[in-house]
Image: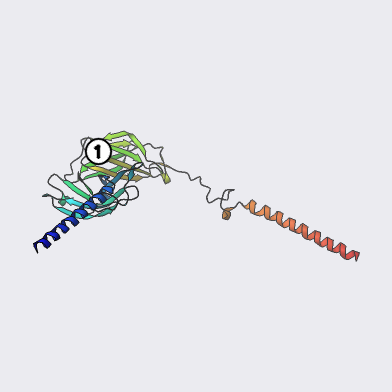
Amino acid sequence: MNMRISNFVLCVILVLFVSGTFQGHSQSKKNRARVSLNYESITGDGSFLIISAKFRGDEGFESARDMNFDVYQVFEGDSLSLLGKVTTNADGIAKFALETLSDQNANEEGEYTLWVEAKNNISYQDTDRDITFKKAELVARIVSEEGINHLVATLVDSRTNAPISDQPLFVYVKRLFKPLKIGGEFISTDETGTISVPVDSDLPGLNGNLTLEVVLSDNDPYGTVKAGVTEPIGIPIVDDSTFNERTMWSPPGKTPLFLLVFPNLMIIGIWVTIALLIFNLFKINKSKS
């Protein structure tokens, strides 16, 4: 009896050993993804956790697509609360909306800590990352001073409403393909957390509207904060499109009228001439008979 029990225990140990070896081998075959986190807040559009994942492939670093993550909020005492799940896209980027964060969920210093975990992915090894950040508010508006338009932006801490000074802000004018940077490389906020940037009056915009964006980029501890404003302070763009006109390069439904009239007149003239010739030949043939 004791011998049977001993053999059974040995079999169980052997199975567990083989299973652990197989799992370890399977895990070693998976790609090791490098994960980075960034907090992003867009005024009027909410706040987001941006997850970027990539791995070293045969041709250098490649995007870790279809990688699943669980997103948790970490509270004091290391307790966790699951906020949701998210999957990376074809570029290895996942954007998770932080709709449940509020001032009541921050610690005494106004900081939030998020922890993401990737576990049991088919193509990637298990990994985790955390990020700690504070929330800031960025407000932008257009102010006219002595006939010159200025973009005025103010950056404050969301929890204390205290101005955030000596922080670099970037100002852009949104264009079709690439934003146009104005005001120099960057502008630092003053003691009131404010910047003022003159806007050139000769910038073109659709119907004269210009969309300007102010960005606090990759800041510690506030992450990336963006704010935009749209005002009719530019030069209206004149629409030189000939899409609705009858031109040589227009679609068939908008063919120039002369191309419709003259070719058809020529075709009618040719057929009339042929008809007259046939009629005269018929008369000649009839007169001979």
Q: Amino acid at mark 1?
A: Thr
Q: Residue at x 42, y 45 (%)?
A: 206
Give percent across and percent down for residue 259.
64, 51
Colouring used for the render: rainbow
Q: Nearer the viewer, residue 91 or 59?
A: 59
Give the camera-side residue of 205 and 125.
125
Residue 262 vertical placement versus 182 (above, below) = below
Say whether residue 258 is left or right of residue 67: right
Residue 37's x, y, as percent? Answer: 25, 45
The residue labelled by disc 1 is 194
Picture residue at 80% right of the left edge, 60% below the top: 276
Q: Is residue 147 visible?
A: no
CA neighbours of label 1 inside 10 A, class few (<14), some (14 to 19), many (20+): many
Which residue is at the far left? Answer: 2
> In the structure shown, which secondary structural element does the residue marked by tag 1 occupy?
strand
Residue 105 left/right relative to 44: left
Position of 268 with respect to 142 (left or right) is right
Please give the count of numbered marks on the rendered protein: 1
Q: Residue at x 81, y 59 (%)?
A: 277
**Residue 89 locus on image (x, y percent):** 33, 50
* Residue 180 at least partly seen: yes
Query: Viewer-proximal residue, 139 or 16?
Result: 16
In this orientation, which residue lies closer to the viewer: 210 or 137?
137
Residue that protrudes farthest toward the top in the picture = 184
- Which percent across, then down, holds residue 38? 25, 44
User: For residue 278, which quarter of the picture?
Assistant: bottom right
